[in-house]
Amino acid sequence: MPRWGHASAAAGGKVALIGGYGGGGAHARRSDVLLYDTARRTWEALEPAAAPAGADDGAQPPPRMGHAAACLAGRYVVLIGGRTSPSDALSDVWLLDLYGSGRWVRVVPEVVPCTPVAAAGPPAWPGRFRHSAVAVPPKGCVNTAAAGSGPGAGRGAGGAELLEGWRVVVYGGRTADTVLGDTWVLSRTGSGGGSGGGGKAGGDGGGDVAKGWRWQQVATAAGAPCPRKSHAACYLPPAAGEGAAAAGSGRMYVHGGTCGYGMHFDDLYYLDLDTYTWHCVYGGSGDGRGGGGGGDGGGVNPRPPACFSHTLNAWGRLLLLVGGYPTHHHTQLWVLDTRDHTWHAYDTHAAAGGQHAAAAAVDSRLEFLPVRHCAEVVSASGGAGAGGGGGCSDKLLLFGGGAFCFSFGTVFGGCYELGLGNLAAVMQRDAAAARVTEANRGASGEGGSGATAGGDRGGGGQGGEAVEGWVVAVPSRSAKGVKDALKARGWLDSGRRGGSSQQQVGPAVHATLVRHVGDGPCICVPMGCITCACSGGIARVRRAMG
């Protein structure tokens, strides 16, 4: 997958990759469509069908990069904007019928007259690139699968009717001269309004899918994020929210981005899709570059570093953030729980076997470089974004990416997948461990002697009461590093004494949680009363052990 700056959309067990920069041989901006079958793990190049005789929609989108795409009704892919050169921002809109006619259709939406841009000049939507676009299903549809998905979607019902009530929310980006911070909604109100640049979408029985579209600028009041490009955005369905959010249309989350050289953001916003009002979850770190307390998963209330050209995908109530520039956090998966807006960092690694065989066949040198890449969450059944935050076979797919360096030339990223089967379980264990640690701290008086009503936790306890806990058995040379790592995260049980592996560390030691294989005697470092292991924590302990 030697390309970057492309766009993706998942529909009915397939992921469509559109355009971008790269390709085999001489690198260039592209207009092709590649389809990835998530079940078979195979690629195919889509050859768009020719327009029927007499139709005027036989054209295809010109080559581009920096565009945005989204899936509508599990069947259509909408393509918006992009650029053919840094001075040529595109404003065109296209629809690709993946499971019907298999043809591109040009859409020319009207601009609602009451919007500021229409009042000030010609009614045209401002072209842009490096923007974001998310698809919003009609109310009552929890996700795209509920609105129709898969090869049979829309057949019999009519393709055009499937699009009724769908919206595409576009935010930010840039023109040749300006970084943008406006919010627009592309919607279809039926075949009676708007103008269409294409003819009938023959063969779908659903009327003219190119007609009835309009642009409307929204969220013009104060509170919106500052202008930015190359940010990450995703749609959170209402069923994944809590309280009032679960009864509405959902939210669009926006993270990070950049507005110029050295000015990167680490803030987080969401747009209420019922009222079109912006809400700031937290602001930036203030210096335009900093990580806002994060990057390594440590500290209080960690958060991802300031970055751009990354991806954000919804998985149930969780948001998954991967990659971006700067690149020092690429091995981390950042997970946001939208119930309380807390971030969690999990270490990952790019195994050679994790790259798709099809991608390796294109170029075996493609590495893990998630910058200007695309990402999609798919379930075992092929549905996009399914799983509800707990599907055992769900996975996060990363496609392409790369960068250009004046010293080393052009570098492209490969295609990788990350299984999400145990992510929700690990997060539950993390939360349980944190609660137990907090309870232990409260019982011991925040760093006190560790004495409890039951007696001295370091000994056998008065009256024979046992204090449960884990230990970490490590070689002597690693004991100090592991102890410091546990203490920094609040996992060290200061109420119990450590000792050699031949000594009793506590009256009711469950088992050895982590044991470093090596020669020489082991030192047992006591942990708090944790009844289930945290695999993310284990990974960090192992790293501390070297």
Image: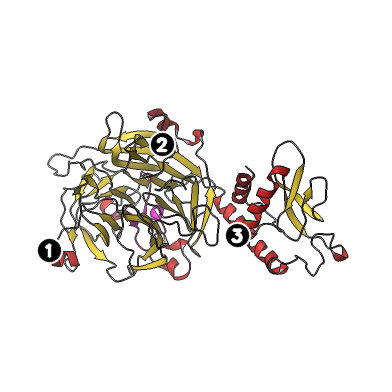
Q: CA distance from mark 2 to mark 3?
A: 34 Å
Name the residue that disc number 1 marks: 121
Mark-to-mark CA distance, 3 and 1:
54 Å
Q: Amino acid at mark 2?
A: Gly
- Mark 3 and mark 2 in contact (Cβ < 8 Å)? no
Please check the rendered image and state whether residue 464 is part of the magenta-colored stretch, yes or no: no
Residue 513 point in image, percent of width and height: 70, 48
Q: Looking at the image, is mark 2 or mark 3 earlier in the sequence?
A: 2
Residue 250 visible to an observer of this rendering: no
State which quarter of the image contains the C terminus.
top right
Residue pictured at 32% horizontal, 50% vertical: 70
Q: Circle 3 is placed at which residue position?
A: 431
| 37 is higher (above) or lower (below) than 153 | above
Q: Which residue is mark 2?
A: 414
Q: Of callouts 3 and 1, which one flags the residue occurring earlier in the amino acid sequence?
A: 1
Q: Locate the N terminus by quadrant.
A: top left
- Left/right of residue 322 with respect to residue 276 in the rendered view: right
Q: Is residue 360 left or right of residue 523?
A: left
Q: Is residue 163 left or right of residue 538?
A: left
Q: Is residue 122 left or right of residue 346?
A: left
Can see residue 279? yes
Residue 248, position in %: x, y? 39, 67
Q: Secondary structure at mark 1?
A: loop
Crowding at mark 2 (Cα within 10 Å: few <14, some 14-19, many 20+): many
Magenta range is 133-151
What kind of residue is marked 1? Gly
| N-terminal-most mark, 1 or 2 | 1
Q: Quadrant of residue 496?
A: bottom right
| Residue 116 at x, y percent in the picture | 19, 67
Pointers 1 and 2 in contact (CB under 8 A)? no
